[in-house]
Amino acid sequence: MRRDLLYIDSNIFVYPIIYDGAAIPEARRSREFLLEVARGRFEAYTSVLTWDEVMPMEIRTSVT
């Protein structure tokens, strides 16, 4: 069986960081998707450009 390779864009990383998953369905689904990727259910990748967009967001929310 062939598994599709999925691209993870910045919004999938950002939504769970800045939004409450209980209030915003997209944040909850993004978090669940990332957990499934970590568990090996999906094969996914991202890019350096995407990571450069996400990391400043993570740093800002961690500091405030």
Image: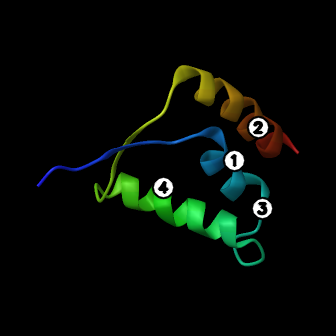
Secondary element at tag 2 = helix
Looking at the image, is mark 4 or mark 2 earlier in the sequence?
A: 4
* Pick the front one: 62 or 48: 48
Looking at the image, is mark 4 or mark 3 earlier in the sequence?
A: 3
Residue at the image position 70 percent from the left and 55 percent from the top: 15
Secondary element at tag 3 = loop
In the rendered structure, are the residues bearing label 3 and label 1 in contact, judged by CB atoms less than 8 Å apart?
no
Looking at the image, is mark 2 or mark 3 earlier in the sequence?
A: 3
- Give the numbered dot on residue 34: 4
Q: Is residue 56 left or right of residue 13?
A: right
Tag 3: Cα neighbours inside 10 Å, few (<14), some, or many (≥20)? some
Q: Residue 6, position in %: x, y?
A: 40, 44
Q: Which residue is mark 3?
A: 19
Disc 3 marks which amino acid?
Tyr
Disc 2 marks which amino acid?
Met
Looking at the image, is mark 3 or mark 1 earlier in the sequence?
A: 1
Distance between the alpha carbons at the discs numbered 4 and 2: 17 Å
Tag 2: Cα neighbours inside 10 Å, few (<14), some, or many (≥20)? some
Q: Which residue is mark 2?
A: 57
Q: Which residue is mark 1?
A: 14
Distance between the alpha carbons at the discs numbered 2 and 1: 7 Å
Q: On the image, which quarter does residue 52 sit in?
A: top right
Foreground mark, 2 or 1, reads: 1
* Pick the front one: 1 or 39: 1
Looking at the image, is mark 2 or mark 1 earlier in the sequence?
A: 1
Disc 1 marks which amino acid?
Val
